[in-house]
Image (cartoon, grey):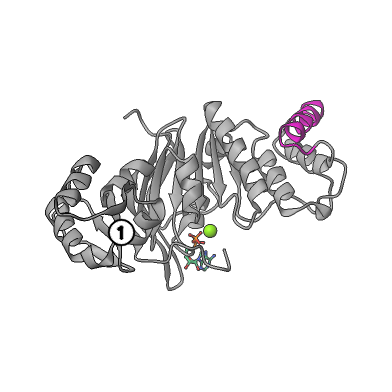
């Protein structure tokens, strides 16, 4: 692999008695979307804040495009954008006013700041609302404005900390489109999320974080393969369930779990052909209503890896 544009090695961070990061490693190739997936309190925000130069690690180091986030913080900042879990925009200013202000904060000349603000408002569908005060924006509009603000300098690397937490499906879709567009334009995106679906849809690679460490990495597909496919069978007659179980145990190499009288589900340790399943059931005189191979969802992977509930906790932080 080419040198990763985002690299974290052995990051540790404590807050009093809380060990937020316990040796977090991460490597993101340029031009890809990395999904950092973890439950509340896993250490996602802390990791992003370190990578974005907002806080220093107690141990370990991190580099963006080869630049150390502590020693070269100013140069790192010129290459990155950050949209945080909480919108950084000023509720008392208009959308346009906010973006112009950010442009000026980033030392763009006045005319360039105005131009960039207009471009970004257009791109995020905020032109009509541009001259309204942000205090009256919906949550989705604020997030889009926040994302726009993080793009003012056309960053090579964009950090998005839970960009869609708490958003309605339509606003979530708008953010997803924006992330895809940025990635297609060559940017590297690191986004944290508690939503498995989000990681599954957007990320080239997923890093599953739990208790301050990365406990698994891979493409969503590779992570799913780690727990293997399942064979699901529904038999027509509950009286033949025992015979069906015998057949499935022989084919799958594991005894199936019976769920609800006629439904079986068995994890596969080796590939099985559906045609063989159907033929063997037939030979045993078992009528099957349904025979299916099922890919595990990323939720199941997450559950298996963390032993935690895959649903995001109520109060997202
Ligand atoms: N500034 C802070 N002071 C004290 N504890 C903190 C602070 N920031 C984070 N923590 C704690 O560190 C752990 C990781 O937090 P965080 O990085 O915000 O996780 P996530 O973003 O995955 O929910 C949590 O237990 C959290 O309470
Ligand atoms: Mg967080």
19 relative to 230 in the view: left or right: right
Residue 64 position in % (x across, y down): 46, 37
Q: For the point 59% across and 44% down, which residue is it?
A: 82
- At a point 51% along the width and 46% down the height, the residue shown is 191
**In-front residue for pair 16/85:** 85
> Looking at the rendering, in which quadrant would you find the N terminus?
top left
Corner quadrant of residue 65:
top left
Residue at the bottom extreme of this rendering? 17
Q: Is residue 190 visible?
A: yes
User: The residue tagged with tag 1: helix, strand or loop?
Assistant: loop
Query: To which residue does mark 1 refer?
Result: 236
Membership of 112 in magenta stretch: yes
Residue 280 at x, y = what percent?
Answer: 16, 48
User: In this rendering, does residue 70 appear at all?
Assistant: no
The residue range painted magenta reads 109-126
147 and 78: which is toward the camera: 147
Q: Quadrant of residue 154?
A: top right
* 84 lies above or below 312: above
Q: Where residue 273 appears, x then y in whole percent?
A: 21, 41
Seen in the picture, residue 185 relative to 261 is either above or below; the reply is above
| Label 1 crowd bin: few (<14), some (14–19), many (20+), radius 10 Å | some
| Depth check, front residue: 251 or 182 | 251
Compared with 239, 205 (above or below) is above
Residue 21 is one of the magenta-drawn residues: no
Q: Is residue 218 left or right of residue 156?
A: left
């Amino acid at each position: 692999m080419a040198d990763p544009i985002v690299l974290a090695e052995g990051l540790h961070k404590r807050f009093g008695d809380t060990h937020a990061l316990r040796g977090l490693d991460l490597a993101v190739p340029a031009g890809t979307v990395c999904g950092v997936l973890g439950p509340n309190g896993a250490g996602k925000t802390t990791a992003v804040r370190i990578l974005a130069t907002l806080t220093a690690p107690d141990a370990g180091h991190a580099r963006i495009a080869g630049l150390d986030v502590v020693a070269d913080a100013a140069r790192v900042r010129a290459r990155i954008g950050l949209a945080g879990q909480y919108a950084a925009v000023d509720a008392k200013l208009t959308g346009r006013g906010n973006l112009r202000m950010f442009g000026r904060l980033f030392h763009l000349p006045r005319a360039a700041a105005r131009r960039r603000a207009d471009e970004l408002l257009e791109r995020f569908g905020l032109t009509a609302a541009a001259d309204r005060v942000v205090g009256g924006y919906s949550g989705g509009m604020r997030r889009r404005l926040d994302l726009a603000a993080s793009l003012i300098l056309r960053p090579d690397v964009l950090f998005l900390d839970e960009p869609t937490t708490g958003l309605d499906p339509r606003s979530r879709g708008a953010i997803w489109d924006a992330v895809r567009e940025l990635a297609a334009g060559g940017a590297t995106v690191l986004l944290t999320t508690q939503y498995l679906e989000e990681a599954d849809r957007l990320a080239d690679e997923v890093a599953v974080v739990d208790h301050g460490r990365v406990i698994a990495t891979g493409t969503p597909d590779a992570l799913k393969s780690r727990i293997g496919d399942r064979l699901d069978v529904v038999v027509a007659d509950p009286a033949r369930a025992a015979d069906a179980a015998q057949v499935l145990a022989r084919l799958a190499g594991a005894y199936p779990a019976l769920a609800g009288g006629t439904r079986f589900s068995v994890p596969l340790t080796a590939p099985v052909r559906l045609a063989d399943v159907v033929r063997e059931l037939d030979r045993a005189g078992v009528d099957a209503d349904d025979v299916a191979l099922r890919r595990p969802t990323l939720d199941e992977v997450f559950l298996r890896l963390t032993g935690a509930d895959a649903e995001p906790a109520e109060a997202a932080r």
